[in-house]
Amino acid sequence: MIQKKLSERIIEGLIHASAAIAIVGLVLIFVFIGKEAVPLFTSPEARAEAGLSKLFLAQVPEPGEPAGHMWQPVSEIPKYSFWPLIIGTLKVTFVALAFAFPLALGAAVFTSEFAPPWLKEIVKPVIELLAGIPSVVLGFFALLVMATAVQDLFGLDYRLNTINAGIALGLAVIPIVFTVAEDALTAVPQSYRQGSVALGATPWQTARRVVFPAAFPGIFAAGILGFGRAIGETMIVLMASGNQAIPSWHLGYGFRSLSATIASELGEVVSGSPHYHVLFFIGVLLFVFTFLINLAGQMWVGRFRKKLTGEQ
Amino acid sequence: MPTARTFAVLCGILLSLASPRPNRAAETVTIKGSDTLVILNQRWAERYMATHGIAIVQVTGGGSGTGIASLLAGSTDICASSRPMKEKERVALKAKTGRDPVEIAVAKDGIAVYLNSANPLSALTTEQVALVYRGKITNWKDLGGPDQKIILYSRENNSGTYEFFKEHVLKKKDFTPFAQCLPGTASVANAVARDKRGIGFGGAAYAKGIKFAALQADPARPAILPDEKHILDGTYPVSRDLYYYLRGDPAGPIKDFIDFALSPEGQAIVAKVGFYPIAGKKK
């Protein structure tokens, strides 16, 4: 009896420890990234070159030219406006989700509600296999093959444009949204479906009015996860976006994302320079973005679940 | 490519760590500076250590400015630089050492402007190229071509080619943000080959589907193609010398290594890395 308790206690302790390590690791990552960004607010040299006002307000590139938002870190007068990067990141994320979410959700509803078991056995693993494609391969595919097709299809000026990168990014998001949404739909108790059908509803009415609302928190979580994946993905956007730092929502132009900027510039930046601290500040921004979105998603899902189950 | 450069630096560090240390510190030659030159330095160092081997050569990058600062501080034997030393730096160094630094040109580099092979234009002035990349000219019509938008391809801002082009062609003005930044000369050449309206720049290496624009330093001068002859005799307007700087006359292992770099064997490596040999004569 006592022995069993002891071993159980050890196991419990180990589980606690591993959870704590994960949390401590996360906090440490945030602290170290944050530490490298702090001089942006404390060092006078960094503040003169890249203070908060320079990061977010319009700057005059050279005398006589209109003020604008520019990302030109290597320049006589370095310019570090975040807006081109933020707009670029958000616009490709929206394109990716607009492309991936309906497809993934449709596939999830089909496999869980309508597909015969043998078909489900094929479709589910094949879609989940998409998650196993390294993002550099997706990026390469988008850069060399897809770009020309997308350009011709939409008649765009730029080969590397937001739609192209968005679709490639969507391919990386689909398996995540699909897997989570499909699990949520499958987890809806069979009795819900039987009750609905017994009342005379067709399978489609059952799926739409009964199963889908019951699984909604899970489907919403799938969307949040997909968003988080899209906003932080680096390799695909680095290769397929053209990396133009322009503050424009136009989908026919390229863009420069926050993550790709860190990836391409951190390798060569002078350690300790304002540019270096700015890149770490971008890291902090990305971290905070995804954290807030996940948090908001969690809270919303929790509230919705309570409403659905009638808990107070 | 930045990753290749970083890799070369890492290899240099690893190699120098892995090699057995000589007894006398004098037998280590350190080279620091230009990132453009890192790969060439590394190839030279590898070959030199394999065949001549009286000294260990350590290569680091960091940029020409970093290299010159290290030379000033005395923490490197050789400073590699992709630009001539500025007057201020010369004065500072002279104040430290009491003599002018020794400047040795070790290789030549030329940057070509790429056009799609279907582009009817074949010659541009450097002024026109600068206006195009600054976003002041946006249509081929204004350059005497068809009425089409110009699609610009450039390099990432950490690239030495980017900085060189910015300094020598754009005269330090900013690139237009509409230029698409691609990760490497091969990507730029590839993009221009796929885009009839495209323009790009990079090393003068051949690629299918593109052609090099002949450049005129000003409209009165003839248009010059970036081939070996014109880069070597200096008539092609966008070329530069790459330098080694020393605190004093080379001696001992430093002289031995530089002699190797300038020898026919060393200059053959220059051509392999994609630069041009400095001698200008048949090797």
Image: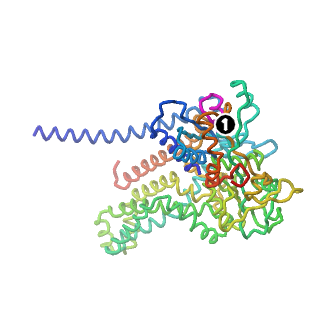
Check disc 1: other Cα within 10 Å, few if <14, some if 14-19, many if 20+.
Answer: many
Q: Which residue is mark 1?
A: B65
Relative vertical location of residue A208 with respect to residue A236 in this rendering, above or below: below
Q: Is residue B93 left or right of residue A205?
A: right
Residue at the (56%, 61%) spot, across then down: A166
Image-based side of A289 in relation to B62, left or right = left
- Looking at the image, the residue that sits furthest to the right is B220
Q: Nearer the viewer, residue B73 or B202?
A: B73
Please tell me whether the stretch drawn in magenta is mainly helix, strand or loop.
helix
What kind of element bears circle 1?
helix
Q: Nearer the viewer, residue B69 or A182?
A: B69
Amino acid type of the residue tagged 1 in the rendering: Gly
B193 on left or right of A234: right
Q: Which is nearer the eye, A18 or A58?
A: A18
Q: What residue do we see at 55% from left, 33% from top?
A: A38
Quarter of the rendering occupied by the N terminus of chain A: top left
Where in the figure is residue A80, as x and y percent of width and height?
65, 42
Which residue, as the protein is rendered here, is positioned at the far left? A1
The type of colouring in the image is rainbow
The answer to whether residue B213 is magenta is no
Residue B221 placement (x, y as % from top left): 87, 56
Q: Which residues are magenta?
A: B64-79
**Chain for disc number 1:** B
Magenta-drawn stretch contains B73: yes
